[in-house]
Image (tube, rainbow, N blue to C red):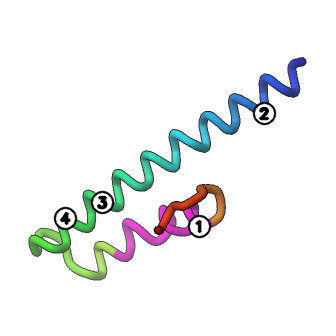
């Protein structure tokens, strides 16, 4: 029973992290489009988030 609960909690946390990463990437997209941050800053801030989305989140970059 505890393993099932832990697995559900982990999946819930992963789902929330997927949403958070997507939100931040969208924010950085807008900041870069408006010229507030450079392409280099954009890459630095989004690289790990995109990697996480690709590894753990379904339909993350569609």
Most prominent secondary structure in the magenta stretch?
Answer: helix
* Circles 2 and 1 in contact, beta carbons < 8 Å: no
Separation of residues labelled 2 and 3 (CA atoms): 29 Å
* Circles 4 and 3 in contact, beta carbons < 8 Å: yes
Q: Is residue 51 magenta?
A: yes
Q: Is residue 36 above or below residue 19?
A: below
Q: Residue furthest bottom?
A: 39
In screen coordinates, is 18 left or right of 7?
left
Instruction: Identify the residue position indicated by label 4 in the image.
Output: 30
- Which of marks 3 and 1 precedes in the sequence? 3
Q: From which residue to which does the magenta span run?
A: 43-54
* Residue located at (41% from left, 55% from top): 22
- Which of marks 1 and 2 precedes in the sequence? 2
Instruction: Identify the residue position indicated by label 2 in the image.
Output: 7
* Circles 1 and 4 in contact, beta carbons < 8 Å: no
Q: Is residue 47 magenta?
A: yes
> Label for residue 26?
3
In screen coordinates, is 43 left or right of 56?
left
Instruction: Identify the residue position indicated by label 1 in the image.
Output: 54
Q: Is residue 12 above or below residue 53?
A: above
Q: Secondary structure at mark 2?
A: helix
């Amino acid at each position: 029973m505890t393993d099932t609960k832990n697995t559900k909690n982990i999946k819930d946390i992963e789902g929330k992290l997927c949403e958070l990463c997507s939100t931040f990437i969208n924010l950085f997209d807008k900041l870069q489009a408006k010229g507030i941050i450079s392409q280099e800053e954009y890459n630095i801030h989004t690289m790990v988030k995109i990697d996480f989305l690709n590894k753990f989140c379904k339909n993350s970059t569609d």
